[in-house]
Image: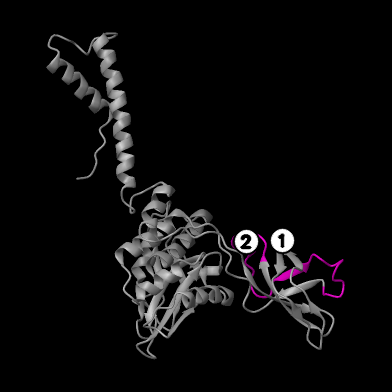
Amino acid sequence: MAWTTRTLAEISARVRGAFRQYLPGTDSALANNFVTITGKVIAGLAHEFELRMAWLARQMFLSTATAVSWIEAHCYEVGIYRNQPTRASGNITGTGTASTTYPAGIRFYSGNVTYVTTAAATAAGDGTLVLAVRAEVKGSTGNRDSGGILALSDGGIYSDLSSTFTVDDDGLGGGADLEDKESLRARGLQRKQNPPGGGTLTDYERIVLAVSGVKAAWAYQMTGGTASVVVLFLFEGRDDYIPLASDVAVVQAAIDDSRLIRADDSVASAPVAYSVDIEIDGLENDTDDVRAAISTAISAMFIAKCKPGTDAEPFSLSRSWISEAISGVTGETRHELVTPAADILLSGGNFPVLGDVTYGA
């Protein structure tokens, strides 16, 4: 039975009735009467007690808990721990003196984030130099897309190095912020609803979800054999949450560390972004704010309801979900969804991302 919190008025009425029942002759309705004042005090204390009990009742279950400490406690009991902030890492390319070895500890910067090389490296015969770097601060702010520029901080010490280095094709990835409580709750519920099975697909999803920065994960049986598993995942802080190769490397390392006996070929992979163009006609209350909210709502719906489709397990993106997301926007009163005209069938690892949104008459 759900906990029901009585209002202060309901409790007050109950207390006044109790005085009349158990102290015949008293009148708790008289102003400034001792019984009246006593009844108000008791009712106030009782109401605070019931509010506290209602709060505690919510904390008793992982699905309804509101306090981070309680969510952490629920998850701790099933071996799920809050993901901590992590540093971004990857490789950058520049030039130095041919055949010269440069030590670890060289610093670079991009914006307000500094990076330090983590290993010694030797320049090639043409001076090309590839350095492994790691952000000195934890968090998603250290992630950089491929082609980004890092400036040399230690130019006075290493004057023969190029003043700027370029992030390689894999990007600088793996940086993540402290996990929020809703992500932790979702992982705890996933663990409770899917107990460890010695190598089930949900076991692999749980391994990947435990990596800081991973937003969602889906494990699939590969067609190459019964011992082959691929895990597609999304990563926080990336465009449309599509991970870079550096993010994949971090997740793959986590899978390798926890590889389960039944699978000898379990791999992490980034979904393929499938752009979904939207055309809307007849939008009433057509304002910039409403349009922006519509784009946000559709993107959120993709994350909440969709998963990558594979050749073996295609996924159908319902056209009605898009229309529902639009209708749920505050300020939207009427619209006609023109495109897509039918459900979209996703395969080949495709995951939907919002494309162009156009508005007609």
The label on residue 43 is: none
Residue 232 in percent (x, y) is at 45, 76
SS at mark 1 in the image: loop
Residue 270 in percent (x, y) is at 50, 77
Q: Quadrant of residue 196?
A: bottom left
**Residue identifier under label 1:** 111
At label 2, counting other C-alpha atoms closer than 10 Å, the crowd grade (few under 14, some 14-19, many 20 or more) is some
* Quadrant (top left/top right/bottom left/bottom right) for the N terminus: top left
As rendered, which of 120 and 188 lies closer to the eye?
A: 120
Q: Quadrant of residue 206?
A: bottom left
* Residue 140 among magenta residues: yes
Q: Amino acid at mark 1?
A: Gly
Q: Is residue 10 visible?
A: yes
Q: Earlier in the sequence, mark 2 or mark 1?
A: 1
Q: Which residue is found at the position 13% from the left and 16% from the top?
A: 22
Residue 254 in percent (x, y) is at 49, 73
Q: Amino acid at mark 2?
A: Thr
**Highlighted range, magenta:** 135-162
Q: Quadrant of residue 53?
A: top left
In the rendered view, tell whether residue 253 sits above or below residue 324: below
From the viewer's perspective, tell me whether residue 179 is left or right of residue 138. Answer: left
Cα gap from disc 2 to disc 1, whole angstroms: 9 Å
* Residue 234 among magenta residues: no
SS at mark 2 in the image: helix
**Residue identifier under label 2:** 141
Q: Main secondary structure of the magenta part?
A: loop
As rendered, which of 2 and 264 lies closer to the eye?
A: 264
Mark 2 vs 1: CB contact within 8 A: yes
Q: Which residue is found at the position 31% from the left and 24% from the top?
A: 44
In the rendered view, tell whether residue 96 sits above or below residue 5: below
From the viewer's perspective, tell me whether residue 94 is left or right of residue 8. Answer: right
From the viewer's perspective, tell me whether residue 72 is left or right of residue 250. Answer: left
